[in-house]
Amino acid sequence: MINIQEVIETNQMIEKENLDVRTITLGISLLDCIDADLQECKKKIYNKITTVAEKLVETGNLIEKEYKIPVVNKRISVTPIALVGGACCKAPEDFVEIAETLDAAAKTVGVNFLGGYSALVSKGMTTADKNLILSIPKALAKTERVCSSINVGSTKTGINMDAVKLLGEIVLKTAEETKEADSLGCAKLVIFCNAPDDNPFMAGAFHGVTEADAIINVGVSGPGVVKTALEQVRGENFEVLCETIKKTAFKITRVGQLVAKEASQMLGIPFGIVDLSLAPTPAVGDSVADILKEIGLEHPGAPGTTAALALLNDQVKKGGVMASSYVGGLSGAFIPVSEDQGMIDAVRAGALTLEKLEAMTCVCSVGLDMIAIPGDTPATTISGIIADEMAIGMINQKTTAVRLIPVIGKGVGEVVEFGGLLGYAPVMPVNAFSCDAFVNRGGRIPAPIHSFKN
């Protein structure tokens, strides 16, 4: 059982080490909102979200006040909208109307983000899937709180290269549509392989069709806590290092479990999972890069970085699994560039390149995340980068993702400011050699041999 003593034990972590519950995410099924009439579908969507999530923000604030645990974000994830809007959306413009409805509902209930403007196209695209994807640039330009994700590959199905090619173009169009805000729309678009149904973190959250009508998922984060714990065992061997990370992750996850259970009880909605992800922020002391430095690297990107990250990710998962019966989502270490001051410093020092980041994604929890690239990067190059990352996920049976931001009008070395939790980032160079002929082949990359497990 979880008791208040375990919360008291974490006071030091909260007050001095940036421990927080990063998000309480309420997953809502919109399958019962499907309607052949667009206006009726929009009305049903708005009414269901505003009814089910009416007390979400209030509940998060009450938990924060009672337990003195920062609950930074309250968010909503919904059924992939390509499925919900398929019956009534005959063109991309129709899906944009649904995006605006989602945005209005998010504002009404007071959440900071709503995820699920999504399509699952790892094996092929329906007409609705394609229309939703084509609508993304306008949808993200016209909304403030809507986040989009597209799953283009999986270990079981392979990689849909038609979708990968299209999304290279969509990323650039989204950047162009939001160029007045440093192409910020791309920060709300993530492309997945093996996307989980229960991820509470944005921009990739959606409510999977295997989930209940409504569910509470919690994402908890504490890079600063792990770093402080490792400072106490500086110079010790790997066994001590691993045990320290594992025990710390256990304590962090217990906090998430408590918050999830409380939110579930107060809202009368079932508890889903706790996602223990070391998700950094631009705040000093809240950096995954600083953990890697404490493990023994001068900068992330130095030789040994991939091994250190693999160790960290594995021990975090082991500690989390012992603390809660329902650990899910992504759970592990995130390595975004713009949201992590240590990663930004490593890029500026020349220690960390896009290619090294790609190698690190083989062992981290997500992938190439929040990386600013030149605005004149060709669409096929973006598609090639997406394909590389999807292949890593497909072959390794893990979730990988890409969130690239081609900043229109800016080039290598310039800095782009996103603000808030999104931070800022130096524009990184990309390989200038062409992959046009590869991307333009079309079709699907088959699933790997080890996918045949039936």
Image (spheres, rainbow, N blue to C red):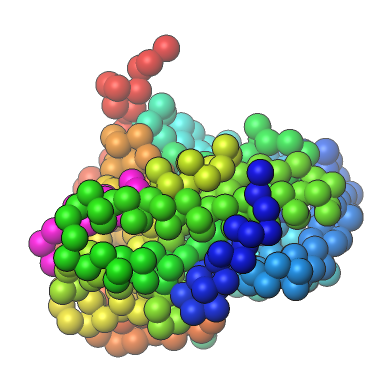
Q: Is residue 416 left or right of residue 137?
A: left
> Residue drawn at (57%, 71%), measured in percent from left and top?
11
Could you tell me which quadrant the N terminus lies in?
A: top right
Give the extent of the magenta segment: 302-315
For the C terminus, the quadrant is: top left
Residue 26 at x, y = what percent?
A: 71, 53
Q: Between residues 417 and 67, which one lies in front from this camera angle? A: 67
Q: Give coordinates of residue 8: x percent, y percent.
A: 61, 66
> Which residue is located at x 25 percent, y 61 percent?
357
Q: Based on the picture, tell me whether residue 374 belongs to the magenta stretch.
A: no
**Predominant SS along the magenta part:** helix
Q: At 47% from the left edge and 65% from the top edge, which residue is drawn? A: 222
Up-down relation of residue 25 to residue 321 (above or below) = below
Q: Quadrant of residue 343?
A: bottom left
**Residue lying furthest left:** 303
- Report x, y in % for residue 248: 42, 57
Residue pushed farthest top? 454
Where residue 189 sits in the image (x, y, percent)?
A: 51, 61
Q: Is residue 213 visible to us here?
A: yes
Indicate left or right for 38 with 160 as reference: right
> Residue at (75%, 73%) from the top-left corner?
65
Up/down of 123 relative to 10, above or below: above
